[in-house]
Image (cartoon, rainbow, N blue to C red):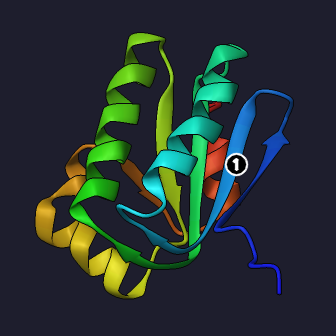
Amino acid sequence: MSQEPFFDTRLIDDDILAVLLRGSLDSTTTEEFDREIQKHLDEGRSKIIIDCRYLDNLSSMGIGRLVALQTRLRRKAGAVKLATIHGPAAEVIKLVGLGNILEIYGDLEFARQSFYQ
């Protein structure tokens, strides 16, 4: 039986990478996440939306990866934004103050529009 990948990627407006996460962003998934994101960074992309509608768990390692990614993208005049986050993952983000570092939006469309404001 094939396991569904824990994320999907697609381009929006030709220059925004949308990443749909499923399950957990933790020690078992961050390496694969990093490899996929790096491919897009190597192609010059600096605008990323992480769609968290199916994200169940966000570990300290996952938080570290998001903060590191935001730091890298800011150097390139870009950003990583979170969309549709809820449940335990939202509680973790609130607890550690990640909302002070990353912009968080109620849905993917609002996150997309924010890149043009």
Name the side, left or right, on which 20 lies relative to 35: right
- Of residues 107 and 56, the one nearer the viewer is 56
**Image position of 5 (left or right of 84):** right
Q: Position of residue 90 (x, y in %)?
A: 34, 76
Q: What's the residue at 61%, 22% (across, down)?
A: 41
Please give the name of the residue rendered at 15% of the width and 58% of the height, measured from the top-left corner.
97
User: As drawn, which residue projects farthest toward the front?
Assistant: 1
* Quadrant where the N terminus is found in the figure: bottom right
Q: Which residue is mark 1?
A: 18
Horizontally, is 115 left or right of 79 in the view?
A: right
Q: Nearer the viewer, residue 1 or 5?
A: 1
Q: Residue at x 82, y 41 (%)?
A: 12
The residue at the far left in this view is 96
Residue 26 lies, in percent from the top left, at: 37, 64
Quadrant housing residue 107: bottom right
Location of residue 39 with respect to 111 vertically, above or below: above
Position of 39 relative to 17 (above/below)? above
Q: Quadrant of residue 115?
A: top right
* Mark 1, other Cα within 10 Å: few <14 / some 14–19 / many ≥20: many
Percent coordinates x, y for residue 39 in the rendering? 68, 27
Q: Is residue 10 left or right of residue 36?
A: right
Q: Which quadrant is home to the C terminus?
A: top right
Q: Is residue 59 above or below residue 49?
A: below
Label 1 residue SS? strand
**Residue type at mark 1?**
Ala
Q: Is residue 111 above or below residue 71?
A: below
Residue lying at 64% horizontally and 40% vertically, measured from the top left:
36
